[in-house]
Amino acid sequence: MRKLPIIFVLVLTMFSITMYSFQAGATENKNNLAKAAGSGSLVIVGGALSSDNEAVYNKYLTLAQQYKGKSIKDVKIAIIPAASAAPIESADSYKDDFVRYGVPEKNIYTAPIALMDDPSTKDVDESTWKNNGNNAEIAKKMEEFDAIWFVGGDQLRHIKTLVTADGKDTVVLQAIRKIYDNGAVLGGSSAGAAVMSNPMIASGTSVGALNEGVHILKNFDQDTGDDQLFLTTGLGFFTHGIVDQHFLERGRFGRLLVASQYNKTRYGFGVDENSAMVYTAKDNSIEIVGASGLLIVDLQGASTPKGKRFAMNNVTMHYLEKGDRFNLNDGTFMLNKLHKTTKGIEYYSKNPIAKDIFGPQVLKKVLTEDLIDNEAAKAEALWFGMEDEKKGTGFRFTFRKTDKTEGFWGKIDKVGSYSALNVQMDVEPISIKISIDK
């Protein structure tokens, strides 16, 4: 039997026309104070780091060598396995990778800091390490290392073991801050990336964030659930905005936007999988390394309409890939020399509305193929959920070119690579109604 076609009717929810400007500078004092927190480097990986990602591993190890002018054979690395449900297994996996890239195994130390017992070990109960963040002997040992690596898992486990219940640094975290202040490199993937900012995102989805807003997690043992966006204490090594990870692959654009707006932070940084945002404190710059890219949201010129549901206008967005750089001092970009302009030679001419902006890699396609490498002046995308058979609610995202928008494409390491600068974005709530064609 032939199915009857379905017509979707989008009804924009109406708001008061009164607007107020987003106060992006509210965290500038925080940032200025925190600039003195370290002079080292951060290798912030968006998760799913492949063992064969030479670019990321070599960048991390090069920075470790530069700390005290050592050779790769003399570099010392400490692994913090606390976030993992299998801490030894996770630490050993990274240890194998570091050895593969030239670090002697004897120079790699797995710090006995964890909350969970590793099922792969029989003689040790790693959950007994839960209080070792305040172990003076481990803290003293930390000062010997050129690099620290935070494994993935649940970022709250890193916080529970390295931050006290009243929000103060444990002695181990104090030691890590000391070597970072002296120029050491800190790195981490997934949960190990999330902890780099303060506040950090503890949990949540884009849909949960847009529909329910921000929840503050004060008790680290609180059950956050899957959808609600919770912000809580992070380690705060990166001081220029909230960091999110698994970004494009898991469609986390919405939650980063809501979290940054709530925190009155000018910038938000979304790092995709198998890629790294490398921050260098000495020149206050970011470089993109690895397979995918980094999205930067800039809320300085954004405004928020008053109303019952989340909306924003004039959010500025930048998407960067391998070899691109961003200077936080003056907000300028230095792109990979292989990235060439798409202006006037756009490859695409059609851009149908994307039906699920939070699907894997959809945001990247909208920004690149549907906008900066497209003859169209704007691109649109939706997310919606049905309340019953006939109606639902959601959000419409409109991405626009302005006279400042620039698009770039080039083949880097034999793979096509995009950059997009100064894209303007609006998000508005919508209602969905379904009628059946007769």
Image (spheres, rainbow, N blue to C red):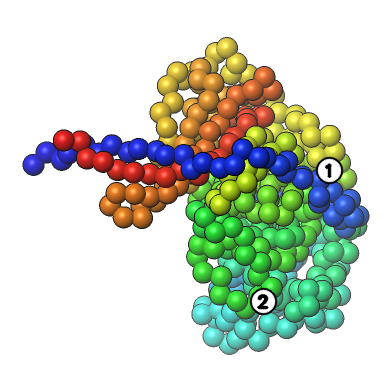
Residue 75 visible (yes or no) = no
* Left-right relation of 61 to 223: right
Residue 415 drawn above or below residue 258: above
Q: Position of residue 354 (x, y in %)?
A: 43, 36
Q: Nearer the viewer, mark 2 or mark 1?
A: 2
* Left-right relation of 80 to 237: left
Q: Position of residue 192 (x, y in %)?
A: 66, 61
Q: Residue at x 72, y 66 (%)?
A: 233
Q: Position of residue 47 (x, y in %)?
A: 58, 54
In this rendered view, identify the residue nearer to me: 344 or 293.
344
- The answer to whether the residue labelled 2 contacts the one labelled 1, judged by CB atoms less than 8 Å apart, is no
Q: Image quadrant of residue 267?
A: top right
In this rendered view, identify the residue nearer to me: 44 or 23.
23
- The number of discs equals 2
Quadrant assignment for the C terminus: top left
| Residue holding disc 2 | 219
Residue 130 visible (yes or no) = yes
**Label 1 crowd bin: few (<14), some (14–19), many (20+), radius 10 Å:** some
Q: Amino acid at mark 2?
A: Asn
Q: Amino acid at mark 1?
A: Asn
| Residue holding disc 1 | 284
Q: Image quadrant of residue 81?
A: bottom right
Q: Residue at x 80, y 82 (%)?
A: 135
In this rendered view, identify the residue nearer to me: 120 or 236.
236
**Helix, strand or loop at disc 2?**
loop
**Label 2 crowd bin: few (<14), some (14–19), many (20+), radius 10 Å:** few
